[in-house]
Image (cartoon, helix red, strand yellow):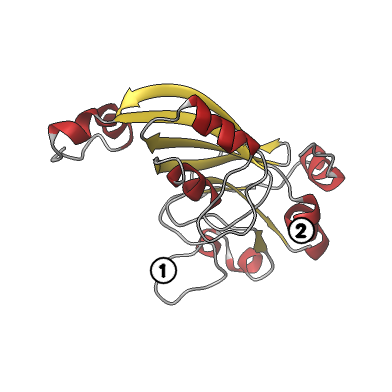
Amino acid sequence: MFNKPQGCITARSDELQRTVMEYFPKELADELFPVGRLDKDTEGLLLFTNDGQFDQRLMHPRHHAPKRYYLFATGELSAQAIERIECGQELTGEEKPTKGARITITERIKYEEFEKRFNPRKRFRDNEFNRNRPVFAAELEIYEGRKHQVKRMMLAEGCRVIYLKRIEIGGVKLDESLKPGEYRKLTESEYDTLMSGDWKN
């Protein structure tokens, strides 16, 4: 279990950018590989393994492990938008709609408040409209793994994700005692939960 920080890419190696593997000692980095991926600007729960069966159990489309995210996005979601998210959306460039997801709005604030929390040293230079534009926080659970899926789901409803953190995979939650860049072994119980694959999605 690894708490991925922002600013690194999910790759084994890269000539130009820092990768998640650079947070591990060489003996582990040589052995492990990431299960799935998180975007460079996304943080949170990322699993690593040296077991192809474990990777297949979580990532194969036939029984994709559910993933839960915490996000902030600009804009507002109407009741109709929430219904589309939960019943399946049409995304640009996709032939099939998304699987139904679960979303819970947890907070509604202004963009200026978001900046104060996440980047308090930044000098705000935007205009009055930008400072006061609506921002919402939400928890979103999805049951598939399309590229940039969470961001595209919000964008389809006219909202832009400005913070994204994965907090759970397959019933196993991120250990919040792990600071960004830290990792630990899965407990036996966590491993069994992930391998059981008893997900209702």
Closest to the camera, between mark 1 and mark 2, is: 2
Is 190 situated left or right of 161 in this image? Answer: right
| Residue 174 seen | no
Using the numbered discs, state the Cα–Cα distance from disc 1 to disc 2 in whole angstroms: 28 Å
The amino acid type, in three-letter code, at marker 2 is His
Between 20 and 116, the one lying in front of the other is 116
User: Residue 172 at what x, y percent from top left?
Assistant: 71, 38
Give residue 128's mark: none
Give residue 17's mark: 1
Name the residue rendered at 80%, 55% in the picture: 62
Is 64 situated left or right of 151 in this image? Answer: right
Name the residue rendered at 62%, 34% in the picture: 86
User: Residue 16 at what x, y percent from top left?
Assistant: 39, 74
User: Residue 149 at what x, y percent from top left?
Assistant: 55, 51
Quarter of the image for the C terminus: give it: top right
Is 93 situated left or right of 76 in this image? Answer: right
| Residue 142 seen | yes
Secondary element under disc 1, as helix, strand or loop, is loop
Residue receiving disc 2:
60
Check the image and name the residue furthest to the bottom. 15
The amino acid type, in three-letter code, at marker 1 is Gln
Sequence-first disc among 1 and 2: 1
User: Residue 13 at what x, y percent from top left?
Assistant: 52, 73
Name the residue rendered at 50%, 25% in the picture: 79
